[in-house]
Amino acid sequence: MSSLHVAQVSPLSICLILLFLLPTAQAEEADRYARERADMLDTIRAESAFTGLYRDQETLDPAVMSAMGRVWRHRLVPEEQREYAYENRPLPIGYGQTISQPYIVALMTGLLQLQAGDKVLELGTGSGYQAAVLAELADRVHTIEVVKPLGERARADLQELGYRNIQVRIGDGYYGWPEEAPFDAIVVTAAASHVPPPLLRQLKPGGRMVIPVGSAFQVQQLVLVEKAEDGSIRTTQVLPVRFVPLTGGHD
Amino acid sequence: MSNTSPERLPRLSLVLLSGSALGYEILLTRLFAIVQWHHFAYMVISLALLGYGASGSFLSLTRHRLLPRFQTVYPLLIAAFGISAVACYLLAQRIPFHPDELLWAPRQAGRLLMIYLLLALPFFFAASAIALALARHTRAVSQLYAMDLLGSGLGSLAIIGLLFILDPMQALRLLGVLAMLASALAAWELGARRGPILAPVALGLLLFALPGDWLQLAVSPYKPLNQALNIHDTRVVAERSSPLGQLSVVQSPAVPWRHAPGLSLLAEGEPPAQLALFTDAAGMTALNAEVRQLNDLRYLDQLTSALPYHLQRPQRVLVLGAGGGSEVLQARYHQVPSIDAVELNPQVIALVEEAFGDFTGRPFSAPGVRTHIAEARGFVADSKQRWDLIQVAMLDSFAASSAGMYALHESYLYTTEAIADYLEHLAPEGQLAITRWVRLPPRDGLKLLATVVATLNDSGVGDAADRLVMIRGWQTSTLLVKNGRYAPEQIASLQTFCRERGFDLAYYPGMPAAQANLSNRLREPYFFDAAQSLLHGDAEALLRNYRFDLTPASDERPYFFHFFKWSLLPELMRFKGLAGSNLLDTGYLVLMITLLQAVLASLVLILLPLWLSGRSVGAPLLARGRRFAVFSYFGAIGIAFLFLELAFIQRFIQFLHHPLYAIAVVLTGFLLFAGLGSAFSKRLASSRRQRLGVHAAVAGIALLTLVYIVLLGPLFGLLAGWAMPGKILLSILLIAPLAFCMGIPFPLGLGVVGQQAPSLLPWAWAINGCASVISAALATLLAIEFGFGVVLLAALGMYILAALSFSALARGTG
């Protein structure tokens, strides 16, 4: 891994630094965040290595990890949280909402098995981070946020970061996004007392939906909903860590 | 010892001060349950009570300077309590502390410490005033301590009553005013004129001039009510408050609530218009709008809890935990002619039926529906009726349940005795239905199953395996127990029900393994496997080998929500960074942390004054051995008093059922009669009688406790049908002699210390204060691990230790 890659400094570039002090400072900052981002991915890999994943899958999806290596998480959290942006922990984003810890984002995104050309629907934009990760992997992302100021901030941030394939809508997500349906994948991070039936109808046959369940700071489980080609629905309840509740067998 | 002054014994001020301080303690639990979470309230308040211990340590070092200025200092301390009680809470609730973030953000620990310190301050002032009064009047210790207990008893009763009339913030302001009155009374009792009397009164009145927004509850932004209020157009349309909780009715016209937890993924219809009902800013339930035709409620038939209606056509249904009325509507949807609905909180029913009656269509007044304001378990136990279906609603929210916040909560709804009560009230072929959240890895549902199986086996039915059915969706599981065997056509209906809704079969008589874990897949068929082990295999092995504690809850150990096993800890620590902390039930962790913090802080508070005063010349100290006797005596009775009190609250809850009545009656009864005992102990104050007095009191406590251990169960069983006033009267009569004896040892001990080494008096007070804090957490821990019987026996042991210590303490007096 080239996680600690630092550019060599030549005499010429020192002149350039003097000439373009400001942009270089920004570049340095970007460099620092890139290092932090790489460290974050290493942390996630290391920690998940010994707990293992659901169904004994040993590694996180490399495509997802590399997508997460490209997303500027520090630009998608509130200013005062920026210094923690690349730590593997959930962060508050205001309005009683949080952004999931990167490990959970990696797991959730991996469960969707996205492919180029996919169209994704997300309920609960929050800070826009999950949408950005999805947008690195899929063709188009449509995301709906019910809390207006959150949605507006995410829309502006995502635009500034240059995500042209994400559309943010503010409002009620219960009926999905009928004009753009059907979707290859759906993520429901908004707290809902149940899976809205209209969303299932907007999922393509063969499509996958993921729902994290838990409280603001702690995801308890991920629910994976799969729609078979014949339209039948099956769910799988996934624990974020490998944990065997029954030991010792029936001796 | 000091110059004689015309001052009176500060009786009245002490009563009012002690009453306000205890009222404040109870009020804080209410306030913190609203702005934070109640398990957190438990931790904060336990620690804040260490202010009592701190006051003793403080006075150990300063008493020689403060005692001569008693007339000034005593009223000032009371006034400081009044001001800080209001101010410290208002400040503490503004500290942006989020318990969930503790794991990641170290600064949260600093904030928590700030909250501890802020809230310890009022208790510190109150306890300093009390301890100073005791130190000032060493010969009147028993009378003053009696006033302290009397005040506390009245205070606990008064605050519960007040919370029915005032909202918690108004109650806080009133407590501040009462404390200022106590300060004025104190000044008057100590012979002051005008200024010192009028000043606190004026300050108290000033509390009414506080700006309104200072007195707003600062609810955590992560509580579901506040999260919901961020949604466009959402607003609170009604609020009610009582000791049972703060209720908020919330309207959301732009984004309908559509509250239907456990709804089948295959459901077609959506819920009708709803209003949300939040309890303490969390625990959301819904009030459904009146529907034109019953078919508009068909979503209620798409829940796992609808299963019993498909296996029989019940004529009489009992709903336990009626809440917003969904279960009653579910029964009506299934055309049940006779429905009994039981709800604990009368304000909930009033909201549904009166304030929002036009919206809801008054479901509790519909033909055939009878509503009972009662505690569910007590209602069933006292009833002579039988029902075709007893439906136990999910009374706790998923978030609270999933985080294990109830781990410390006693719940008498899901104990083996409770299940037996429900089953006894089933008509022939009738069913009991209990729905629970599905948590991962499975806990509640399996423990419930284990509890039901244990109950059936104990009751002597040989065919438990033929009487059970269990299904699950991804959110909820429903367990049915039939008064009889399930028939093949019922099994066929069960299969159809699950197939049409995409629910999984977890257990039915004769279920093949191949049918398990198909629609909502878990890593293993946990539910099916557990049911097989419990019914057909080695139940013991399952309980032993399962990583969570599935031991059935009993009335003796009523901790249904406790799943923690110590063997889990190392593995959970490894998962810490990976969202694995949710495997830990936070309630138990909170308890352990509280206990640890209390022990450490107590050690400091108890040892520090010894260390500091050991170097100063002022106070004549007792010999080391005698000092140890002071420590063990006051430590032991501090622990024993609260152990007995808590254990008897648990016993009387089973008789009075209603948690509020039980706590009010038992707490007030104990404090008032202990106060009488303390007042009486004055007659034992001569040195020869002191030891006799303590030994007789301990013998009395031991005898009565042992008699009660044997007798209370059968007696309560015999009198279960009594009306509430009779039950309350009998409870008070039973508590009186025991509490009377319990009031004697503390003042007698203080008397001896006061004679022998007055400088150690505040130290004894500190030890007692710390011991009470430790004992509250320790009692819960013991009850969870071993049951309340052990708490009672431990209390007896502590009293015997106290009696022995007293002999050492009083040796050589006179």
Image (cartoon, coloured by chain):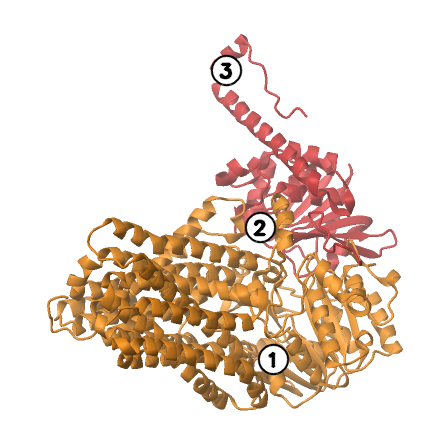
Question: Few, some or many C-alpha atoms within 10 Å of disc 2 (few <14, some 14-19, many ≥20)?
Answer: many
Farthest residue toward the top?
A: A11
Q: Which mark is residue B377?
A: 1
Write down which chain is painted red: A
Residue A6 in percent (x, y) is at: 59, 20
Q: Between B547 and B13, which is closer to the camera in this rendering?
A: B547
Q: Are marks 1 and 3 on the same chain?
A: no
Tag 1: residue type?
Arg
Residue B555 in percent (x, y) is at: 60, 75
Protein chain holding label 2:
A
Q: Which residue is found at the position 69% from the left and 85% from the top?
A: B425
Mark found first going from the N terminus, 3 or 2: 3
Tag 2: residue type?
Phe
Chain B rendering hue: orange
Protein chain holding label 1:
B
Q: Between B313 and B137, which is closer to the camera in this rendering?
A: B137
Tag 3: residue type?
Ile
Q: Which residue is mark 2?
A: A217
Q: Does the CB distance between marks 1 and 2 fall below 8 Å?
A: no
Closer mark to the observer between disc 1 and disc 2: 1
Q: Which residue is found at the position 22% from the left and 59% from the top?
A: B63
Q: Which residue is mark 3?
A: A17
The reply, left or right, for residue B283 in relation to residue B608 is right
Dot 3 falls on a residue whose secondary structure is helix
